[in-house]
Amino acid sequence: MKFGVVVFPGSNCDRDVAYVTRDLMEQPTRMVWHQDTDLDDLDVVIIPGGFSYGDYLRCGAIAKFSPVMQQVIEHAQKGKPVLGICNGFQVLTEAGLLPGALARNQDLHFICDRVPVKVERTDLPWTQNYQTGEIITLPIAHGEGRFYADEDTLSEIEDNGQVLFRYERDNLNGSLNNIAGICNLKGNVLGMMPHPERASDPMLGNSDGLKLFQGLLEKVAALV
C-alpha cells in the first residue's frame, strides 16, 4: 500500500505524517510536490497541516489552484482514500471535495491544545478500529478551525451521517454541532481539524490517532 503526502509551500506537518506511514507502519510513502501531476502509483493521498502558500488569502484558497489538486480530485472521484488534516481539511473544502468551510476560531486566537474527540461512526475504514462513541484525545493547532455551513448544508451533513468526529466537551473553536471531522457521501474523503499523526507514536504518550491510519491500511490492503 503506497501513501502520498502532498507538500505545498508552507506545509509543516508533512514529515509528521510521513513518519507515521513510512516509519511506524512501514508502508511506501512518497512526498508529492504541489506541482506534481502524477498520482497513479498512490493508493492513499494525504494533505497535511501547515500554512499552504502562507495562508495569505484564505486558508486553503490558493492551494486549491495548485497543479496537484486536479489529480487529487480525480483520485477521490475514483473512490480512492483522501485525508485532509487541519490545513488539509481547509484545502478539501475549498476544492469542493467536502461541504462547509473553516472560519476563524470563535475567540479569534490560535489554539494549540489536546482535546477529547468523540468517534461518531465506525463503519468506514478511517474509524473501523475505534468503538462507536469512543472518546479519544487528539492535538489541535489552528487559527481557522471553526466548522461552518449554512443551515441546509449542515442538515444534509447530519442527515447523511457525514460527521465522523466531534469535539467532546471542549469545543474551543466554536464549530457548529461540535464538528471536528467529516467525510464525503462515499466515505472515501475525510477532513479533520485534529491531528491524528501527532498522536500516533507511543513515545509521545498517546497513540489514539494511530488507529485511524491502521484501520485504513487494513481495509485498503484487503481490497488490494
Image: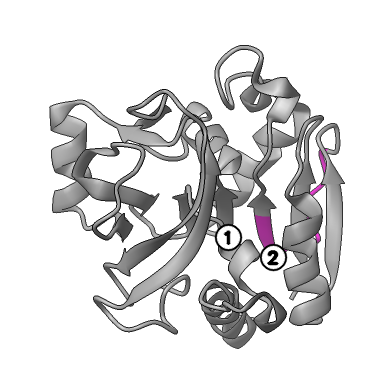
Count every numbered label the image shows and give the total. Answer: 2
- Residue closer to the observer: 111 or 70: 111
- Residue closer to the observer: 146 or 40: 146
Amino acid tagged 1? Lys
Q: Earlier in the sequence, mark 2 or mark 1?
A: 2
Q: How is the image coloured?
A: one colour
Amino acid tagged 2? Asp
Is residue 38 covered in magenta? yes
Q: Residue 31, labelled with which disc?
A: none
Q: Residue 80, labelled with which disc?
A: 1
Evaluate whether residue 214 shows in this view. Answer: yes
Q: Residue 43, labelled with which disc?
A: 2
Local packing at callout 1 (Cα closer than 10 Å; few below 14, some 14-19, many 20+) is some
Q: Position of residue 158 (x, y in %)?
A: 17, 50
Would you say the residues marked 2 and 1 are in contact, meaning their CB atoms lie under 8 Å apart?
Answer: yes
Residue drawn where x is 61% and y is 79% of the image: 205
Q: Position of residue 131 (x, y in %)?
A: 32, 84
Residue drawn where x is 50% and y is 52% of the image: 113
How would you classify the magenta stretch by its main secondary structure?
Answer: loop
- As displayed, is residue 66 above or below residue 188? above
